[in-house]
Amino acid sequence: MTQLKAETTAEAWFSIGEAAEQTGVNPVTLRAWQRRFGIVIPKRTAKGHRLYSQAHIEQIVEVLGWLDRGVAISKVKPLLKDSASGAQQSSTSAAAVIADEQISFWQMNIGYLNQCCISLDGSGLHRKLSELTAIYPFNVLKTCLYLPWLADFSKSSALSCEDKVVQTWLAKELANAFSARRLALLQDNYPAILLVSLCDVDEWQAILLSAELSANNIKHQQLSIHQVGQLSELVERVDCQQVLLIAPPNFNSADTQALQLLATNLLDRKQQVELHLWGVNAQSHNSIFGLSNISLQQLSSNTLAAGAAVKMNNERCK
């Protein structure tokens, strides 16, 4: 479940942007929940601006809890604590609702997306992804849609030529679908994180990790390399304070030596650059190489701090 990012009081009121920052649910999604499903109805100012109380924040978190458990957003309202039947529904039929919705709703969407892939229907694929992105936070989509869907594309090592064509097509379409937010963030004037993958890393992992960073407003450049040794030159050419290297299942001996040397060299620089391994294989490798684990929340905080520092510096220069 999404964690709150700040302590609040019951008397406080928050703008839609502040509510989004605290809960991780973007303003577009909050508006869609209100308009389409009657969920989380905010107070309005005289000028029509939305204001959210602590109770609203708690309700957003409650909604996220149901979504994390697989319930479709269209079925959440009766399950909420402040609904007319919420208390009874939550205790008597929630389990059945979750089971039904988790199987039928997400499988239905996966089936539709698979059909788009079979027919190479880019328009239908992007339309469905846009529709789901508007009403579901990325973390929910990642868990309930992207991971189970894309696992089917990676489970066979003996793909036919036709399957490989479809897989390559889908990878490009997904990268395009997620690129708009990443490119928009690059317009902000503060250093970007360097997200780097080795060529033998699962391409779905690299695509989804980049999308997750973008969904959390973390500015980054995305690159692919053949050998870890290439990273040193890239760091010199790109203005960055952090490097996230998507860890493969195993490093070969040359990459192991290059990574150990790189970690030392980056710390010895006048302007130090942090190096972290990232992804599903990162934690075990970080301990081997003596690198620290870093969370998405820490990356988000670092990004906010970098943006604030640049803004302050710009103000001083005026």
Image: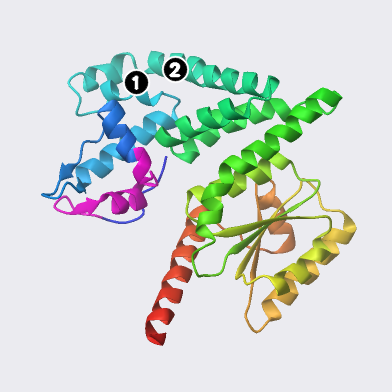
Q: Which residue lies most toward the front here?
A: 123
Q: Nearer the viewer, residue 33 or 71?
A: 33
- Quadrant housing the C terminus: bottom left
Q: Quadrant of residue 93?
A: top left
Residue 19 magenta-highlighted: yes
Secondary element type, mark 2: helix
Which is more N-terminal, label 1 or label 2? Answer: 1
At horizontal 67% and vertical 70% (from top left) the residue drawn is 238
Whether the residues at callouts 2 and 1 have beta carbons within 8 Å, the answer is yes
Per the image, the residue denoted by label 1 is 75
The x, y position of residue 280, in whole percent, is 66, 44
At horizontal 60% and vertical 49% (from top left) the residue drawn is 210
Q: Left of 74 or right of it: where is 295? A: right
Q: Left of 159 or right of it: where is 271? A: left
Q: Which residue lies most toward the left here?
A: 46
Q: Which residues are magenta?
A: 8-29
Kind of residue at disc 2: Glu
Residue 51 magenta-highlighted: no
Q: Is residue 223 above or below residue 149?
A: below
- Quadrant housing the N terminus: top left
At horizontal 50% and vertical 70% (from top left) the residue drawn is 189
